[in-house]
Amino acid sequence: MAHPSRRIAYIYSSDYASIASRLPSNLERSNFQLFTVVYAPQDFLKRVEQEGLSDGEDEEGDHQDGGEHRNIKEDRLEEYGLRYDCPVFEGIADYAELVAGSSMEAATLLSDDAFDMVVHWDGGRHHAKKDMAAGFCIVNDIVLGIMELQRTYERVVYLDLDVHHGDGVENAFQFTDKVLTVSVHHYAQGFYPGTGSGNPTSSRTKAAVNIPLKGGLSDTTLCKIFDDMIEPLFKSFDPEAIVLQCGVDGMAGDPLGKWNLSLQSYVDCLKKVMAWKKPLMVLGGGGYKNTSTARCYALLTSVALGREISEEIPEHEFFEDYKPDFMLQIDPGRQTDENTDDYMEQVRELVEAQTDFLESK
Ligand SMILES: [Zn+2]
């Protein structure tokens, strides 16, 4: 079904993709995403080229991170989270600027009513803190994007489908009830970042709902969670705009191996969020198998446009990586869904306890 009246923008430039492809946790992933651009139908897609990329010629090394950071003491890097899982890489300053700037641009396009929906697959870096990189996230573009949205839309719902808890976004809005953060994530001892248990806190200043899940999450369970828990939250909170983080590291076949979702799960969630008919920013997130992530984001882009794309992967630069079948769909996983009916009943109660504040308004 086409959505001719929905105005959709896609934030992209080849320069941005090549810099984002240097992110050590997701090497080459953004270049794989070029596939979305060659594959997805273009006629309804308004491409917004991100500008402002420094060419490095006239700034006398201001952005030459590779050299600059060698002068910074190691403990200073640690203070800003730029070690271990977030090491400094060549072009990191440009990368941070582009990721943050692109989500802010997406928000501006929505706030100005220039578009109804803006897609930014390199965004969605939900772990970064105000002054610190964390969990493969150098800068929290989501928080900056939501703040920009709030210039026009005060009440925002943030929905995070990544397999990890959206801790950075929840923390940023902990002193306001104008931004409802909803995170669906794997929760287990030792699993990053270790927050998002869903146990209600004494603080009632924040509007946060956490849905902690066990391993092997299936399409069926996620669908029920959406219909039974997320949809009512949307209705009660009644936001003016939505930000959807589509981390796809819960997909079957992702190296993290925690959940068992198919492409269809993400398609269904996107369709349901689109049916809310609010200004919508769609962001990426985790996803550690480049061919699966590119498949999913190409399909989601086509869904956004209401257009079908071929099941056969088209020839392009990374075509050979899609062997042996060269098809769009991914192999279904065989994990057992540990989110049993009994456990889901506990989760439902947990969600209800966290949403008292909505009913008391
Ligand atoms: Zn993740």
Image (spheres, rainbow, N blue to C red):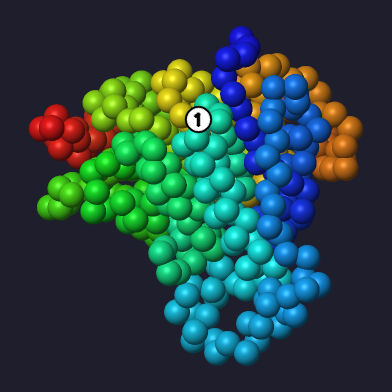
Residue situated furthest front in the rendering: 112
Q: Considering only vertical position in the picture, is 173 above or below 322?
A: below
Q: Considering only vertical position in the picture, is 246 above or below 305?
A: below
Q: Is residue 183 among the parts visible in the rendering?
A: no
* Front residue of 312 and 308: 308
Find disc 1 in the rendering and name its residue.
113
Residue situated furthest top in the rendering: 1
Q: Is residue 93 among the parts visible in the rendering?
A: yes
For image coordinates 50% across by 53% down, the residue present is 141
Q: In the image, 347: left or right of 33?
A: left
Question: Where is residue 333 shown, x and y percent of the image?
Answer: 59, 33
Question: Where is residue 4 shown, x and y percent of the image?
Answer: 62, 13
Q: Considering only vertical position in the picture, is 11 above or below 267?
A: below
> Which quadrant: the C terminus?
top left
Q: Considering only vertical position in the picture, is 23 above or below 188?
A: below
Q: In the image, 11: left or right of 167?
A: right
Q: Quadrant of residue 233?
A: top left
For image coordinates 24% across by 49% down, the residue present is 176
Name the residue type under label 1: Asp
Question: Where is residue 92 shown, x and y percent of the image?
Answer: 64, 67
Question: Where is residue 174 shown, x and y percent of the image?
Answer: 26, 53
Crowd around label 1: few <14 · some 14–19 · many ≥20 (10 Å)? few
State whether label 1 is within 8 Å of ligand 1: no
For image coordinates 61% across by 9% down, the residue present is 1
